[in-house]
């Protein structure tokens, strides 16, 4: 059983717009969304396992909203750094006609780099989640790499979500090397079909796994939105269909897939050694749970599964 679940990432307040009008305001951030869903599920099912978010916020009412929300949802704030005299990040998530979100971020340019974070001791068996542009941005890369390297050296299980957006394509010459370093430090890598197309110029997941991912990390997940999920390990490849649902918004869909997969690893007692050689039978246990988390988030205005979602697992 894991000793801790640890997320590393950015935390923001998402203001969701549809038709030019705000319809919700919720704490968010790629890894943060996953950690809240884990707090609502793993936190209830396994109350003795600490769930910790390592992040940085400002010193304002937005930070109060975020930290209160964390505590209410079973997340420890021991990894939160509040920076005096600064404002927390706020984002606009504008839903289009297909309920896909388009983001615009408002950051305090005076906020210092993501550094001098609370000390945290990683241990063998810890489950660590990180990813998105936060993991490769030059302003946060140094701190993220130090944390991930420490987790890797300690024998933690590391789950990395590439989550590379079109808006960051100009940064790709620098970012690609950081992404490859993250893959090499991880036990599980997930990328969407869009991610691998941006990075490698193809949506062929098998080709990307063989040429680019498998030399660094043997366990790879490629999610293809509403179509299917392809998975790869040294023990073989499998593909799983995605059930059709009525989508309210795609905000948090991938983040909650990550949460569901980590929850399934925890509930199934998967060790670091077993994750390195997942079989088709293992995948058949893990992927449907991850997909169930993702579908639940897509059927809600919020970025995470409902508080009672765990009762149906």
Image: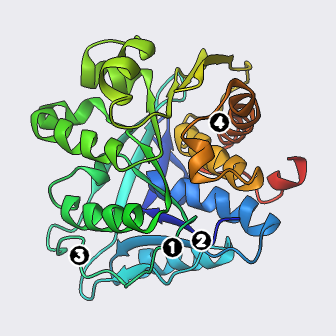
Q: Left or right? Give the position of 175 relative to 83.
A: left
Does dot 4 land on a helix, a strand or a loop? helix
Name the residue located 81 percent from the left edge and 64 percent from the top edge: 45
Residue at label 2?
Answer: 4
Callout 3 touching callout 2 (CB < 8 Å): no
Q: Left or right? Give the position of 33 relative to 299.
A: left
Q: CA distance from mark 1 to mark 4?
A: 34 Å
Single out the residue that lies furthest toward the bottom. 84
Identify whether 108 is placed above or below 186.
below
Q: CA distance from mark 3 to mark 2?
A: 22 Å
Residue at label 4?
Answer: 298
- Front residue (pair 188, 172): 188
Whichever of callouts 1 and 4 sits on the residue coming sooner in the sequence is 1
Task: Specify the quadrant of the image occupied by residue 248.
Answer: top right
Q: Nearer the viewer, mark 4 or mark 2?
A: 2
Q: Residues within 10 Å of mark 2 (few under 14, many from 20)?
A: some
Residue at label 3?
Answer: 115
Whichever of callouts 3 and 2 sits on the residue coming sooner in the sequence is 2
Q: Residues within 10 Å of mark 4 (few under 14, many from 20)?
A: many
Q: Residues within 10 Å of mark 3 (few under 14, many from 20)?
A: some
Residue 301 appears in the figure: no
């Amino acid at each position: 059983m894991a000793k801790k679940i640890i997320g590393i990432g950015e935390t923001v307040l998402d203001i969701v717009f549809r038709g030019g009008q705000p319809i919700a305001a919720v704490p968010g951030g790629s890894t943060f969304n996953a950690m809240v869903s884990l707090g609502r599920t793993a936190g209830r099912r396994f109350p003795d396992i600490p769930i910790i978010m390592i992040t940085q916020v400002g010193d304002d009412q937005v930070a109060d909203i975020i930290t209160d929300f964390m505590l209410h949802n079973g997340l420890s704030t021991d990894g939160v750094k509040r920076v005096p005299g600064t404002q927390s990040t706020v984002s606009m998530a504008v839903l289009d006609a297909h309920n896909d979100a388009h983001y615009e971020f408002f950051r305090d340019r005076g906020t210092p780099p993501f550094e001098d974070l609370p000390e945290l001791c990683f241990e063998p068996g810890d489950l660590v989640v990180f990813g998105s542009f936060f993991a490769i941005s030059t302003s946060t890369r140094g701190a993220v790499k130090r944390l991930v390297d420490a987790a890797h050296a300690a024998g933690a299980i590391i789950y990395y979500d590439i989550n590379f957006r079109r808006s960051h394509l100009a940064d790709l010459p620098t970012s690609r090397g950081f992404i490859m370093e993250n893959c090499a430090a991880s036990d599980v890598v997930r990328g969407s079909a869009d991610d691998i197309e941006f990075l490698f110029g193809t949506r062929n997941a098998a080709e990307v796994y063989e040429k680019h991912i498998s030399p660094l990390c043997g366990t790879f997940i490629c999610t293809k939105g509403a179509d299917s999920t392809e998975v790869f390990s040294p023990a073989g490849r499998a593909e799983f269909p995605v059930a059709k649902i009525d989508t309210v918004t795609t905000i948090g869909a991938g983040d909650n897939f990550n949460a569901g997969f980590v929850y399934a690893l925890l509930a199934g007692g998967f060790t670091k050694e077993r994750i390195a050689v997942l079989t088709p039978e293992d995948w058949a246990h893990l992927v449907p749970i991850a997909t169930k988390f993702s579908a639940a988030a897509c059927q809600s205005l919020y970025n995470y599964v409902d508080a009672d979602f765990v009762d149906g697992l």
